[in-house]
Image (cartoon, rainbow, N blue to C red):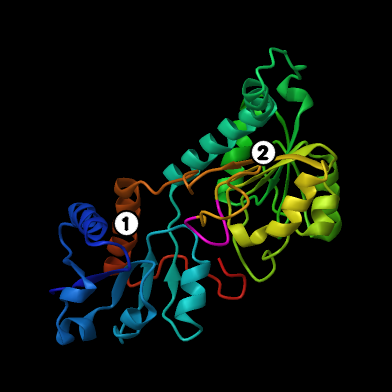
Amino acid sequence: MTTSPIPLVTRGDAASEEEWQAVLAAAMPDETILPFRTLTAEQRGRADIAIVANPDPADVAALPNLAWVQSLWAGVERLVGELGAGAPPIVRLIDLELSRVMAEAVLAWTYYLHRGMPDYARQQRGRIWQALPYRPPSQVQVGLLGLGALGATAAERLIRAGFAVAGWSRSGQPVAGIEAFTGADGLSRLLARSDIVVCLLPLTAETRGLLDAARLAAMKSGAALINFARGPIVVKTDLIAALNSGHLAHAVLDVFDIEPLPPDAPEWDHPKVTVLPHISAPTDRRSAAAIVAGNVRRYRRNGELPDTVDRMSGY
């Protein structure tokens, strides 16, 4: 039986869309992957699967018979919010390569803070030749916020590097080798003991604004923050105030409320902020396409949907 074409629905530029189409087509030679804009009305009506990357909700709504939607990103809060409650089931990208790359970034920037790189950069600008005290990783407590696939892989990498690691999650799920906290009291306890806090949480109604003035004040004096999750989890003005007061030593920020970060944003020039252009865990097109292809093949074979996003939790 001939299967219906799979629309590729994006708001990206034409070159990026063409690259995705090529790599998805190579991974699924038995399927027809077509950009949404090229579909006929008949093809739109027959489509039962859509592959999306920041799609225009109107385009998805123009595909009336979708059984499910495959996202090309791990983070789906924007997709869930824009498509609304009546949308087809959404499948987010769960990629072991993405977890590996994120764990690599967590370790790299934990080392950056652990070895005093922001301080040495300031000393260089001031022409100061001075060695700073060294602490072994075993004396540095790293607190991970989020213990899903990304957090668990990051924890493993940090432990292998010798860091003391604990974590917090909404579910309180255990992770091998670390103490896991949950609940409001558990979050406060983790923040109070951590020298470096790494945020890997999904953005949901519960996590938006989670790290506000009160929770930043609960962090250990002189601690540092790494946010590789989503910008709105951290209240920007409260973070700047905590850095200005000296309560927090430094923040490494890869995500922001508005991206790209506007030229007049205070983070650019703040001496205690390292700005990264959302590069901690870029999606690998080939590994992502292989995962999407596996999901599509299983659905074609037995009609079963892959694991879908829980709209109540947002992920």
Q: Position of residue 247 (x, y in %)?
A: 83, 43
Q: Which residue is mark 1?
A: 294
Q: Which residue is mark 2?
A: 271
Dividing the picture into quarters, in which one does residue 264 lie?
Answer: bottom right
Front residue of 280/309: it is: 280
- Disc 2 and disc 1: Cα gap in Å? 46 Å
Per the rendered image, the range of residues in magenta is 255-260
> Where is residue 169 shown, x and y percent of the image?
70, 55
Residue in the image at 35% along x and 53% along y: 291
Q: Is residue 81 left or right of residue 27?
A: right
Q: How many other residues sit within 10 Å of disc 2, few (<14), some (14-19) or many (≥20)?
A: some
Q: Secondary structure at mark 2?
A: loop
Instruction: Name the amino acid type tagged 1.
Output: Gly
Quarter of the rendering containing residue 127:
top right
What is the magenta segment's predominant secondary structure?
Answer: loop
Q: Camera-side residue: 229 or 275?
A: 275
Q: Secondary structure at mark 1?
A: helix
- Looking at the rendered image, the quarter that the C terminus falls into is bottom right
Type of amino acid at the residue the image marks with label 2: Pro
Rendered location of residue 182, percent (x, y): 78, 56
